[in-house]
Image (tube, helix red, strand yellow):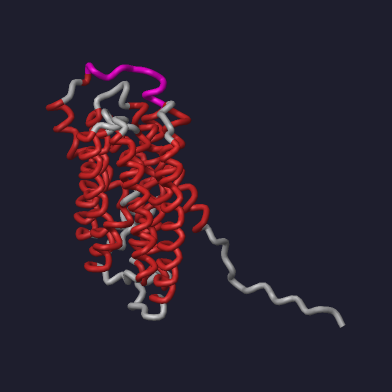
């Protein structure tokens, strides 16, 4: 008698989540080096305002070409505009200002502390569980980040003022992450991301024209290449992946992937900009890596368990999306 093979499950779908995670981490971490490269040829606020407005124009055009109208309500329009100010204008504005005197690698390292603050605030505002295992992973992760940053500051490799700007930007990103989950916009993410970029560009443009000079922009192919990469791949595709991960993994689970930014950010800074790579940087990655394992493992289990207690799903929305939106 032959061995019976198990039937292929009907409706089984390709799992795009691992690819989304890897792509997001590569885009997000390389964006710091790309931004640092373009800052050599343009003032930061002018560069960001142009980046956001171009990304908004591309996404609005894409939505128009789909021919499905503009699926967004007034509430979500306001929510996405607020998120654009926090996640784009304030977070990246402070990052770009800080990166004028701080390396791309250390900026990526500081931004990777996002999961720590997000997990603490999510436990309070979003009722996401903060277990001892997750807390241990978060402590290991932030410990590795602090170790790397402290060693580079003591070695006079980084500017404290630039680091302060980056930390302030991190607080804005954490606020935007919590607001996204708390306010739970349900409108189309393409439209929502376009609104965020448009709001950020409109908010930054008056500041850029007031405090910076267009004549300081130096036309160079590296400026245009870095600008196109930041505007089209990071602002458009990267942020779509970020909000997809927020809806799929939960605020703590999605933010945990920022712990991958220290090694990747330092690597891209070394490859693209020739930034100095210290042995202690590699040593600090070890607790960070283990922290990733602890946080993402418990976050995924908690998110899956929450699927058994679902609210009513809106039409056209999967149960998993409805539980996490």
Q: In which quarter of the image is the C terminus?
A: bottom left
Q: Which of 61/55 is in front?
A: 55
Q: In which quarter of the image is the N terminus?
A: bottom right
Residue 6 located left or right of residue 174: right
Quarter-of-image position of residue 109: top left
Q: Which of 129/192 is in front?
A: 129
Residue 8 located left or right of residue 71: right
Residue 220 included in the magenta stretch of the image? yes
Residue 291, above or below 58: below
Is residue 233 visible to the viewer in this orientation of the structure?
no
- Say which residue appears at 34% left-offset and 52% top-offset: 143
- Say which residue appears at 43% left-offset and 49% top-offset: 260
Residue 312, above or below 232: below
Direction left: furthest residue: 210
Q: Position of residue 61 (x, y in %)?
A: 36, 42
- Say which residue appears at 35% left-offset and 34% top-offset: 104
Q: Position of residue 69 (x, y in %)?
A: 34, 54
Q: Which of 303/54 is in front?
A: 303
- Say which residue appears at 24% left-offset and 44% top-offset: 167
Q: Give the range drawn in magenta.
A: 215-225
């Amino acid at each position: 008698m032959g061995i019976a093979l198990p039937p292929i499950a009907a409706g089984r779908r390709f799992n795009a989540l691992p690819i989304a995670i890897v792509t997001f981490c590569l885009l997000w971490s390389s964006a710091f080096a790309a931004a640092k490269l373009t800052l050599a040829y343009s003032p930061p606020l002018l560069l960001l305002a142009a980046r956001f407005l171009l990304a908004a124009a591309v996404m609005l055009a894409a939505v128009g070409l789909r021919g499905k109208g503009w699926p967004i309500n007034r509430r979500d329009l306001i929510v996405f505009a607020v998120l654009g100010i926090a996640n784009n204008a304030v977070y990246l504005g402070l990052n770009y200002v800080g990166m004028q005197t701080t390396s791309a690698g250390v900026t990526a390292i500081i931004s990777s502390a996002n999961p720590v603050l997000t997990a603490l605030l999510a436990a309070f505002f979003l009722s996401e569980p903060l277990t001892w295992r997750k807390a241990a992973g978060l402590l290991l992760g932030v410990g590795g980040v602090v170790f790397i940053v402290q060693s580079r500051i003591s070695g006079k490799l980084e500017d404290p003022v630039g680091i302060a700007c980056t930390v302030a930007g991190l607080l804005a990103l954490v606020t935007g992450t919590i607001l996204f989950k708390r306010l739970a916009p349900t409108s189309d993410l393409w439209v929502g991301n376009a609104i965020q970029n448009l709001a950020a560009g409109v908010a930054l443009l008056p500041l850029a024209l007031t405090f910076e000079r267009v004549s300081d922009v130096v036309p160079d192919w590296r400026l245009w290449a870095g600008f196109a990469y930041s505007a089209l791949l990071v602002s458009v595709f990267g942020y779509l992946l970020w909000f997809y991960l927020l809806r799929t993994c939960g605020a703590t689970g999605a933010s945990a992937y920022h712990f991958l930014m220290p090694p990747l950010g330092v690597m891209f800074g070394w490859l693209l900009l020739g930034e100095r790579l210290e042995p202690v940087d590699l040593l600090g990655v070890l607790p960070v890596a283990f922290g990733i394992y602890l946080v993402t493992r418990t976050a995924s289990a908690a998110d899956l368990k929450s699927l058994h207690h679902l609210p009513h799903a809106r039409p056209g929305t999967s149960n998993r999306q409805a539980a996490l939106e």
